[in-house]
Amino acid sequence: MPTEIQTQLALLRRYFESGVTRPYAFRKEQLMKLKAAVVAHEEEIYAALYKDLKKSKEECWVTENGFFLAELNHVAANLRRWMEPEAVPTNLLNLPSSSRLVREPLGVTLVIGPWNYPFQLLFTPLLGAIAAGNCVVVKPSEFAPATSLVMQKIIESAFEKNYVLFVPGDGSVVIPEMMDHFRFDHVFYTGSTAVGRIIYKMAAEKLVPVTLELGGKSPCVVESDANINIAAKRIVMTKFSNAGQMCVAPDYVLVHASKKEALLAALTEKILKFFGDKPEDSEHYGKLINQKQFDRVVQYLSAGRILYGGRHDASRLFIEPTLLVDVPPGAAVMKEEIFGPVLPVIGYETNEEALAIINQNPNPLAFYVFTGDVDKEHYWLGAVPSGGACVNNASWHLTNPSLPFGGRGFSGTGAYHGKHSFDAFCHTKAVMKTPTWFDPFIKYPPLKGRLRLF
Ligand code: NAD
């Protein structure tokens, strides 16, 4: 006897196989419906994200619904062109054939989201899946419950359940329940590396392709020639946004010893300037998502000497933006993803010394280097294999839809945003077309004596 969810998944399969989701007009219409529903629920989105994470409206706009709408507009404006078959050259051996790439929808896809940007990280892959002509199951994180409820309302007001199905609940229960009994055509997962492994294994059982957007420790190097004022501003803005619960936050800073004191002073000044001396009361400073995350991050406060910050209040899930110094490279805070408002700042004398620390956690999701010197920039970008990178900036690479966003090795596989989202949810079919007016006998057996091997 199939369970309710299995019956629903079979309906998605049938809907996809009917071919309804393939035409451009259908896809465009669904994108516009999604946009209208998101706009109509704007105030509810803000209220929910405030409840779950104490995000200000401005932060929501930049990192959640505004980010999503910018992506949607970009995809909608370019979709027709992306759907066109792409002509590619044909080699001499095959002339006068012609060759093209045809991007086809994958089928019934599963998008799994985390809690830190609960709206954006579920809806941005969803829009890629829709644009590519797929049916979609969306699974939000259970740890951002207010946002999950609004997202459910939005999706159920815009789409039929046999096209986009919203499945809330405990991921460790509902995801195996779906993946054990149904073969998705693609799984797009954003979340921790530990759960990413579980998803990858489940997908491997059925040879389901995956995109894995995972976590990790993104290092930030501040070189001896860096503009310290700018570096401090940009590091503080990104690191303490969403109370440090950002996959691409600079996890720790490695600063050339000659600039360590100057950088620490500038970081302190910027924290005070951006969030005030009572950030718990600031409109622009978030909270930890729940007690479990609060307890985990509080432990890191004792991993070194607190140069600035360190105050915390469990009743408000508040941890002050904190600068840690004198942190031993072997400490847990230097091995685990911090994912909270605690920033270790470590001085280095030689590049090798800094690289030895970075290489404790290879393949970060992002890498940041602050320098005005092109040779140093090239050196660092070449020395640290990461998913993405910024020079004299932190995290903003992900806001350019022309750049693929994704990890590498331990920080993930695959990428999305803009055209890359469309591609992530398509199969690129290789097609060769051969005319019949030209059919030389030398191409047919027996071939003996006709081939010249080089
Ligand atoms: P998580 O792995 O705990 O949860 C992510 C999703 O997996 C949730 O929907 C959850 O329900 C589901 N899940 C949990 N346990 C499961 C199980 N046993 N089987 C199947 N599904 C399960 O991640 P999180 O704590 O929500 O997010 C934080 C992590 O995500 C951090 O490591 C962060 O770096 C990473 N992250 C990465 C990106 C990126 O774009 N690369 C973005 C945001 C967050």
Image (tube, helix red, strand yellow):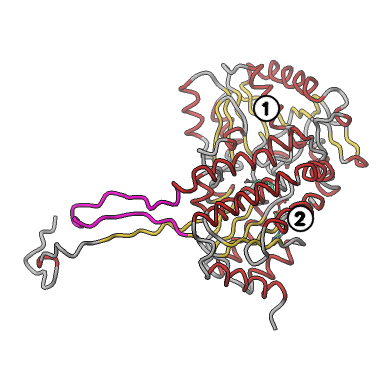
Instruction: State the residue in front, 74 or 413.
Output: 74
Q: Is residue 333 magenta?
A: no
Image quarter where the C terminus lies is bottom left
**Up/down of 124 relative to 169, above or below:** above
User: Magenta region: which residues?
Assistant: 82-104
* Residue 296 visible in the current orientation: no
Check disc 1 and give the amino acid type. Ile
Q: Is residue 373 left or right of residue 38?
A: left
Q: Is residue 403 left or right of residue 61?
A: left
Instruction: Give how far across and how far down residue 441 sits, in percent.
Output: 10, 67
Check disc 2 and give the amino acid type. Lys
Q: Is residue 89 magenta?
A: yes
Mark 2 lies on residue: 153
Q: Is residue 158 left or right of residue 127?
A: right
* Mark 2 neighbour class, 10 Å CA radius: few under 14, some 14 to 19, many 20 or more: some
Ligand 1 neighbours mark 2 (CB distance < 8 Å): no
